[in-house]
Image (cartoon, grey):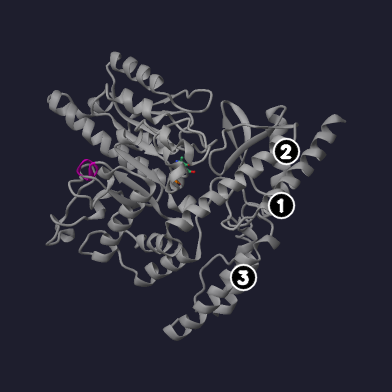
Amino acid sequence: MDSTEFRKRGMEMVEYICNYLETLNERRVTPSVEPGYLRHLLPTEAPQEPEDWDQIMRDVEDKIMPGVTHWQHPRFHAYFPAGNSFPSILGDMLGDGIGCIGFSWAASPACTELETIVLDWLGKAIGLPDHFLALKEGSTGGGVIQTSASECVLVTMLAARAQALKRLKAQHPFVEEGHLLSKLMAYCSKEAHSCVEKAAMICFVKLRILEPDDDASLRGQTIYEAMEEDELQGLVPFFVSTTLGTTGSCAFDNLPEIGKQLQRFPGVWLHVDAAYAGNSFICPELKPLLKVSGWHYHGTANLSQSHLQGIEYADSFNTNPNKWLLTNFDCSTLWVRDRIRLTSALVVDPLYLKHGYSDAAIDYRHWGVPLSRRFRSLKLWFVLRSYGISGLQHYIRHHIKLAKRFEELVLKDKRFEICNQVKLGLVCFRLKGSDKLNEKLLSIINESGKLHMVPASVGDRYIIRFCAVAQNATAEDIDYAWDIIVDFANELLEKEQH
Ligand code: PLP
């Protein structure tokens, strides 16, 4: 394809994408295909000769689209949102067009510098303390874009592990490193995302999974007791991963309490995973969630109550603009209080990657696992500039309003119950009745292809999660979704009675 044809095909692709997004509601939300469906539709080998572009695009519509789950569909309410917007798509397109691999400052200075600036912009916008910002006078911290929240948790755990081992080696110079490693203990709540468990597996460290309270919030006393008990057993607490906005029910660990208790265990790294909820802190009235757990949304009047400084205790914080800030995957933002503590766990420095400004500039290859990095800051920069903070605040508030509307609809029907405190865009609900009944309800709804939701287990109960997802979803979309749920519930309850 030469540039003349690319111009033509590029226009057609933009047209295709616009049509796709504008007519999404005419499609099923989820595909109705069986595993292996595509194998029967595509040849077993790549074509020997070039193929016609029109034919390739016909195959997209006829063979690929029938197997796509439409995450941007107005009746997709599963998981958390998959960020998507036109400025972000254009940012990715430009990044792909430039095609640079910005692993070091020298490998593409703008790629590195824009990332640092945009992470400072976003960090300030969501209310992170100054020590997380790279360009603040005297700060040792900074932000970086990772592929996923899982990677953010992994690299912070790796950094914490390296710090802890360094300390232990200094105290016990003749003890084998493998033995010291076997003493390290990480902590998280039962409600933390499974990526914490995966990170512990990769890091070869033990993980103690703790019980949260009845509101699915991990408490300071629980952490304290577990750590004290482990220390008495000769183990070494080194890392705590807390969550603001859990995956199951968007609950908030009690960061002020946990931070306070950790002061009794110097050197333990405190990470805050706010993959979804962190984006909402861009709204002033939601910033207290960054500090005070258990804060309820009553509007800006409550701001003055935010006297506890939860985030001040944290060593690192992550949120995913690719979840709830209109930025396409991948764009998971991580900030650390001390960038040397992060990079010292990850630096390898062969001659072919060195450059004349290694001491003066940031080399993001030392901030994560991969060497090669895409120009991901472009799309976040486009989003922040073209929506402005005010546009993004409007978007977040719109989703919260939709969630509140859904919550009201559920509360009006006495056959249902709400199972979480609806602070942001996630509502957890269930039919009053057994887990089995709710499993059946969700299964028939999802099979219909009319609406898509996923379950979670919170406090050992099966709940159904309904998340506001589509960027331009309306109140009518929410009402329509509720009508579908009620229709299926009526049908199910009637059947159950006979
Ligand atoms: N942490 C939380 C709180 C999440 O909700 C999720 C996913 O939903 C993750 C981590 C994992 O995110 P990622 O897919 O970016 O690794």
Q: Position of residue 446 (x, y in %)?
A: 69, 46
Identify the amino acid type marked 3: Asn
Dividing the image into 4 quarters, which one contains the C terminus?
top right
Q: Position of residue 146 (x, y in %)?
A: 36, 51
Residue 156 lies in what quarter of the image?
top left
Query: Which residue in the protein does label 1 denote?
Result: 450
Q: Is any atom of residue 77 visible in this view?
A: yes
Identify the element where label 3 is drawn. helix
- Mark 3 or mark 2: which comes first in sequence? 3
Residue, far right: 498
Query: Residue 342 colored magenta?
Result: yes
In screen coordinates, is 468 left or right of 319?
Answer: right
Query: Which residue in the protein does label 2 denote?
Result: 441
Instruction: Give the magenta-colored segment's residue range.
Output: 338-343
Q: In the picture shown, does residue 182 fall above or below 473?
A: above
Q: Position of residue 92 (x, y in %)?
A: 42, 65
Q: In the picture shown, does residue 254 fall above or below 409?
A: above
